[in-house]
Image: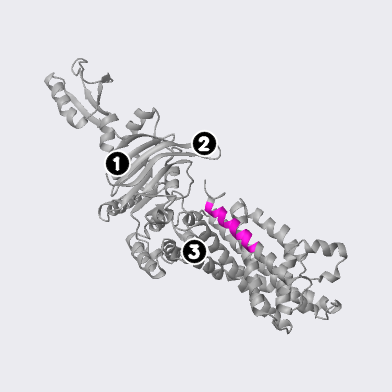
Amino acid sequence: MINKSFYTLVYREVWRFLVLYKQTIMPGIITAALYMVIFGEALGSRIKLENNIDYIIFIIPGLTMMSVIGQSFANSSSSIMQAKYLKFIDDYLIAPVSGFELSMSFIIGAILRGVINGILIILTCALFTSFTIEHYFLSLFFLIVVSCAFGAIGVIVGIVSKTWDSVGVWGTFVFMPLSMLGGVFWSIDMLPESWAYIALMNPLYWMINGLRYSMLGISEISITFSIIISLLFAIIFTILASIMFSKGYKIKS
Amino acid sequence: MNSIIEINNLKKIYSNGNHALNGININIEKGKFFGLLGPNGAGKTTTIGILTGLVNLTSGKIKVNGLDIIKDYKKTRKMIGLSPQEINLDVFFTIRELLIFQGGYYGLSIKESKKRVDKILFDLGLEEKAYSKARELSGGMKRRVQIAKALIHDPEIIILDEPTAGVDIELRHLLWDSLREMNEKHDKTLLLTTHYIEEAENLCDEVAIIDDGKIIAQGSPKDLIANDGESLINITVDNWDSSLLPNFTSNFQDNIVTIKSKNSDKDTPYIINKITDANISINKLDIRKANLEDVFIKLTGKKLTDD
């Protein structure tokens, strides 16, 4: 599968977000730093967790995952929307590459942006507090797999959306609420039983829990199930995005 | 016949029910400069869209160098360079960068691509704009970059969809010279869609006239004009004898006799001789040669262009 055409598509995707680092890398770090100051330092001292972990440390994996989800989704969806809007998506569609290669180039761009953001946020958070990462490879696994899932969702949304508004709707009305309700700032022990049950229905909760376990070594639910859910999301949406590109759904006449 | 593009019974029905192509057949020989001539909405862009992979076909077959464009799309697409009608330049990168990427999409290494880009930028007079972004270029410059994108991987077949639409006459003639050079010196097969009669007549060895998704005539411009075009020979005279040219259709009005001719080069000397032999003095002679527009009007009953 690795050929020069595919390599160029990936290279272009990565180069695009690196050139635009003020829009693609910096905001995530600044937002995470602000959350750390406000929720961690100002409010965190008043919140006691059952496992005796500092609240400021507890929220680091959630903040990281929230940014990774947002950045990876934004990378692929905005890249496709721009290509559609300026019509240079035709350059990709007539190139000698398969639908799978095309979708993977956008998804790999999204993974790299997500992972770079995630790592930089973890490093930024390390400036505010001291913590050690329990499982480095598992942390990297969650950053990659979740970026892949939301990069693929970004591809799908980029393909089906006709306007920038409809892309924005996903971020504002779907991913942000799901992230907030996915355990970024709270432990399931803090919730009433009925809400705890609803939280378990939220796939982002499992992903955030997975990263929290890999970084801090604490888990409220099954880590195996977190891995399975994250992988399933990544695989299903990657396949779907590839099929859409292969068929030319909404992008070919 | 050494066909490089074979289009057989190609049909396209869009999801809105529009029958864009109704079973067209075209064979283009290797090394030809082929024109697809027709009014807006005739099916030209749909045809090349299918050929390049931008449009899904409904039925029919297209082969490029004997390879099916669907089964062997990776191979056939490498043989084709497309310059689309609409400007579609990536605004994030400089012209040089976007051309390097374009080469990469077709399998060139970054190093190979850079070499090709520098040559093409020079050939098309774009070297001073190499580090500019698309939005900083004039319309004519953007059009040249579009053509550069089609050439970057040195394809055998170059497809140009209305390449001179909206460009000034000077640039149009410059582009014509470049296209002729590609065809004659570099042995490229060119497929050009246009609704400019002059363009098709000047550049193309062979033309297919398309209307309402059907090919209504195909051949060299000269043959098409000879078969279906009629030149008008206008002669200003003092008086006229309507029985003088029994083999021609003529009309006399305001001291001008208008004679229809299938071959004005051959007929004009004969007609002048007949008139002077009849002691009718000729005050003025004006010949309006038949062109592809006349052929189109004759075949369809409507004009090819509005402009």
Task: Name the residue at 27% across, 28% down.
Answer: B230
Q: Residues within 10 Å of mark 1 (few under 14, many from 20)?
A: many
Any magenta on residue A236?
A: yes
Mark 1, residue position: B206
Q: For the residue marked with disc 3, what is the amino acid?
A: Leu
Alpha carbon separation for disc pair 2 and 3: 34 Å
Q: Position of residue B265 (x, y in %)?
A: 19, 32
Q: Is residue A200 visible?
A: yes
- Find out whether the residues at labels 2 and 3 contact each other: C-beta distance under 8 Å: no
Let me know if marks 3 and 1 both belong to one chain.
Answer: no
Magenta stretch: helix, strand or loop mostly: helix
Mark 1 element type: strand
Mark 2, residue position: B18
Mark 3, residue position: A9
Q: Position of residue B267 (x, y in %)?
A: 18, 27
Q: Position of residue A68 (x, y in %)?
A: 66, 69
Q: Which residues lie in the magenta part?
A: A233-246
Q: Residues within 10 Å of mark 2 (few under 14, many from 20)?
A: few
Mark 3 element type: helix
Between circles 3 and 1, the one closer to the viewer is 3
Q: Is residue A235 found left or right of B285 in the rendered image? A: right
Q: For the residue marked with disc 2, what is the amino acid?
A: Asn
Q: Is residue B38 visible?
A: no
Any magenta on residue B193?
A: no
Closer to the camera, B201 or A103?
A103
Alpha carbon separation for disc pair 1 and 2: 28 Å
Chain under numbered label 1: B
Position of residue B181 relative to residue A139, above or below, is above
Closer to the camera, A13 or A28?
A13
